[in-house]
Amino acid sequence: MSKFDFFRVEQERRLHEMRTCSEPTEKWPRGCRGSRRPWLVFIGPSPGGKAGLDEEASPRWNEPFTDPFTSPWGGGFKASMPSLLRVLIPEATEAERPFLYAVYNLDSVQKSRAPDVPEERMREGVKAIISLLEQSPPRLIVPMESLSFNRFKEALREHGYDVGPNNAFLISVPIYDNPKGAQKFHRALSGFRIAGNGALNDSIVVRLSQHPAHIFTAAYAERCAKAVRSLFERLAEPTSD
């Protein structure tokens, strides 16, 4: 069985469980939203927004998670999220993808900038996030920016997981859509395969080069997502002992 077939089997198993089984009753941490059986999980520092609201959890069971597409969510989510899902979950159909992903936040209080999220709340929140991930381990975990990636990686180590010593990989992802104008590039991508005896063993973590709220075109989102998917497939290759 190819890795693509294996990924598809995992996705179909999740979809079948949601169609045929009763919804679980486990309580979710505040600020976490999306499928209870995600194949893909995005991790952010907090819900964006300037109102400073403390957002409730919103778990879904056999119900599509389409909130980012219709933008009560701010920034570029409406433009970026469909392309991100299409590239990151290519085995699934367009109709299935909204059933197969979730967005977990380390803090539930809205902050428009990641550096403004209190460090103590992120460190406390990441513990709850790992517990939630272990309830239904996703295959791909995508921190949406550097702070979330670093806090998550540290917390995995504290929980006894092995995340490896060096997680930087060279890439070249154009930031601007105009190829004839001045151009900047994302030059590195961070990712690792989780190892250990816990439930998250063999889940893959790859950080997005740009937060989806700051991606305002589908083309830019596609370029960022292709880099993540490529590294994901590389990290998912069987390892020799």
Image (cartoon, grey):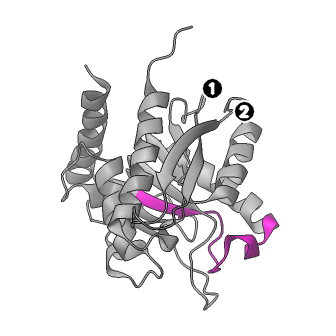
Which quarter of the picture shows residue 140?
top left
User: Does 198 sit left or right of 125 as displayed?
Assistant: left
Circles 2 and 1: CB atoms closer than 8 Å:
yes
* Direction top: furthest residue: 241
- Can residue 24 be seen in the rendering of this structure? no
Which element is circle 2 on? loop
Residue ID for mark 2 = 160
Residue beneath the point at 53% across and 77% down: 56
Residue ID for mark 1 = 196
User: Does 190 sit left or right of 119 as displayed?
Assistant: left
Which element is circle 1 on? loop
Establish if 150 lies above or below 203. Answer: below
Q: Position of residue 51 (x, y in %)?
A: 60, 92
Q: Which amino acid type corresponds to the residue marked 2 in the rendered image? A: Gly
- Earlier along the polypeptide chain: callout 2 or callout 1? 2
Q: How many marks?
A: 2
Which quarter of the picture shows residue 161?
top right
Q: Which amino acid type corresponds to the residue marked 1 in the rendered image? A: Gly
Q: Position of residue 209 (x, y in %)?
A: 55, 55
- For this rendering, which residue is in front, 178 or 30? 178
Specify start and end residues of the magenta stretch as a single range. 102-119
